[in-house]
Image (cartoon, grey):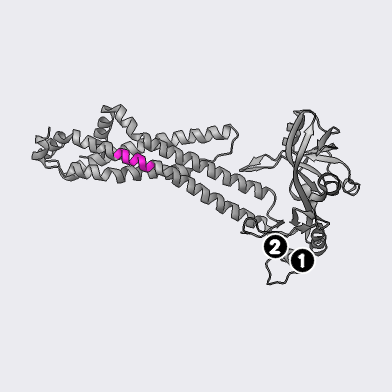
């Protein structure tokens, strides 16, 4: 008996019990759909994170408070504004440098109120972080020196506060104080888990003196949340990082053997770390979803065993007229593989539909890759093969005389 004949018999057996066959492959359908949907979400998040980080440029270096792998609750050393000045003096010809200080506070326009992260910045903050102006003007050095109450809004924040009205020249309240909107930034969109347009930027000195006050000081000195450096020559990123670390050690009286209480990282390092984390989570999501496939495989084995029992006389008759064990074994394996592959195809289509719906809803951008589809179909096929072997072996092992006597 050839493969086509086995497939024809398998289809006849499946269609003879449509409801039972449908319920049998349901576990495979759910498992494959879950694998496709969850892994597409994970891959979409990874792609978004990569695009977001790469959009800032591969020559970006950041200084942030605290060490990598620091224990929760451990005391961290504050980054001072004077650290920025020292770094600027050291690498000013090799990189453009900007500090920033952020804090949560209330932002209001009339009856529209929101808790937002307000960031005090210098004028070069937007250029270093690849933001462009949509309307109005950028913050300038005079705004910072004069501690002016002016604000630059991200596109999402402008929409939330003004609902489509032109915000330029209008006032908003930040922590109860009036600020004039002087500019709105172009939308960069959300990538992965990053929302890049929820911005409220004010001059750094204004942040120190008007908005945050003592919150932005440590032992009477102004602090910053971080320092960003855009290195002129990407080949000098490692050299700049070394110079920054040396400067911070000198400013805080640390020897070369002492732990640096700050994290100095490049964009490439950040991209690698985030990609590794996201890839691990994607694999974990796929593995969790794959458990459903095992449940579906058990269902296939159970129903195939029932089918073998129901068709015992048929098997005995076929053996009595000379059908070898291999033919019986292949027939039942073909039936289980047909069920699992059919379930896999339906599951892929369902998973793709779920991923498409998630993207259309704007929850997160998904990415259904050919690798995920091939992996899912391969898993469903392997599950059908593994869980079909035992029932097929049981069928092939029946003795003709005993099978013919079976009632």
Q: Quadrant of residue 110?
A: top right
Q: Position of residue 9 (x, y in %)?
A: 24, 33
Please report the bounds of the magenta region as a residue range: 293-300
Q: Position of residue 252 (x, y in %)?
A: 77, 66
Label at residue 252 = 1
Q: Is residue 288 left or right of residue 340?
A: right
Mark found first going from the N terminus, 1 or 2: 1
Q: Position of residue 149 (x, y in %)?
A: 87, 41
Residue that numbered label 2 is attached to: 261
Majority secondary structure of magenta residues: helix
Mark 1: which secondary structure? loop
Q: CA distance from mark 1 to mark 2?
A: 10 Å
Q: Residue at x 25, y 31 (%)?
A: 13
Mark 1 and mark 2 residues within 8 Å of each other at the beta carbon: yes
Mark 2: which secondary structure? loop
Q: Residue at x 75, y 58 (%)?
A: 78
Q: Quadrant of residue 224?
A: bottom right
Quarter occupied by the N terminus: top left
Quarter occupied by the C terminus: top left
Q: Is residue 12 above or below residue 272?
A: above
| Most foreground residue, 226 or 169 | 226
Q: Can residue 10 be seen in the rendering of this structure?
A: yes
Q: Can residue 380 be seen in the rendering of this structure?
A: no
Q: Is residue 89 left or right of residue 39?
A: right
| Most foreground residue, 271 or 338 | 271
Q: Is residue 311 above or below residue 83?
A: above
Q: Quadrant of residue 261?
A: bottom right
């Amino acid at each position: 008996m050839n493969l086509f004949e086995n497939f024809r018999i398998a289809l006849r057996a499946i269609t003879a019990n449509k409801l039972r066959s449908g319920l049998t492959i349901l576990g495979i359908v759910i498992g494959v759909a879950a694998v496709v949907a969850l892994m597409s979400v994970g891959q979409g998040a990874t792609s978004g994170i990569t695009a977001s980080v790469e959009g800032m440029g591969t020559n970006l270096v950041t200084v942030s408070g605290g060490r990598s792998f620091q224990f929760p609750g451990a005391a961290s050393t504050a980054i001072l504004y004077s650290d920025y000045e020292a770094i600027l003096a050291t690498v000013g010809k090799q990189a453009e440098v900007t500090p920033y200080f952020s804090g949560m506070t209330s932002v209001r326009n009339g009856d529209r109120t929101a808790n937002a992260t307000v960031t005090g910045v210098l004028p070069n903050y937007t250029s270093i972080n690849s933001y462009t102006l949509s309307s109005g003007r950028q913050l300038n050095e005079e705004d910072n020196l004069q501690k002016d109450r002016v604000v630059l809004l991200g596109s999402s924040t402008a929409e939330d506060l003004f609902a489509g009205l032109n915000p330029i020249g209008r006032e908003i309240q930040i922590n109860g104080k009036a600020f004039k909107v002087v500019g709105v930034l172009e939308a960069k969109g959300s990538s992965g888990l990053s929302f890049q347009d929820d911005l409220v930027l004010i001059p750094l000195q204004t942040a120190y003196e008007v908005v945050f006050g003592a919150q932005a000081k440590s032992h009477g000195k102004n602090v910053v949340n971080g320092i960003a450096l855009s290195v002129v020559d990407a080949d000098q990123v490692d050299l700049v990082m070394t110079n920054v670390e040396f400067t911070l050690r000198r400013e805080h009286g640390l020897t070369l053997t002492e732990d640096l209480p700050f994290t100095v990282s490049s964009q490439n390092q950040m991209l690698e770390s985030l990609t590794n984390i996201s890839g691990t989570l994607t694999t974990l999501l796929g593995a969790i979803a794959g458990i459903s496939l095992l449940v579906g495989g058990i269902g296939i084995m159970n129903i195939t065993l029932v089918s073998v029992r129901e068709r015992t006389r048929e098997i005995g008759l076929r053996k009595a007229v000379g059908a070898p064990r291999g033919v019986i074994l292949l027939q039942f394996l073909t039936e289980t593989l047909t069920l699992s592959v059919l379930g896999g195809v339906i599951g892929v289509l369902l998973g793709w539909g779920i991923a498409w719906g998630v993207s259309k809803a704007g929850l997160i951008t998904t990415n259904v890759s050919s690798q995920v589809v091939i992996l899912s179909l391969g898993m469903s096929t392997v599950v059908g093969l593994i869980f079909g072997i035992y029932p097929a072996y049981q069928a092939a092992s029946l003795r003709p005389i005993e099978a013919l006597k079976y009632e």
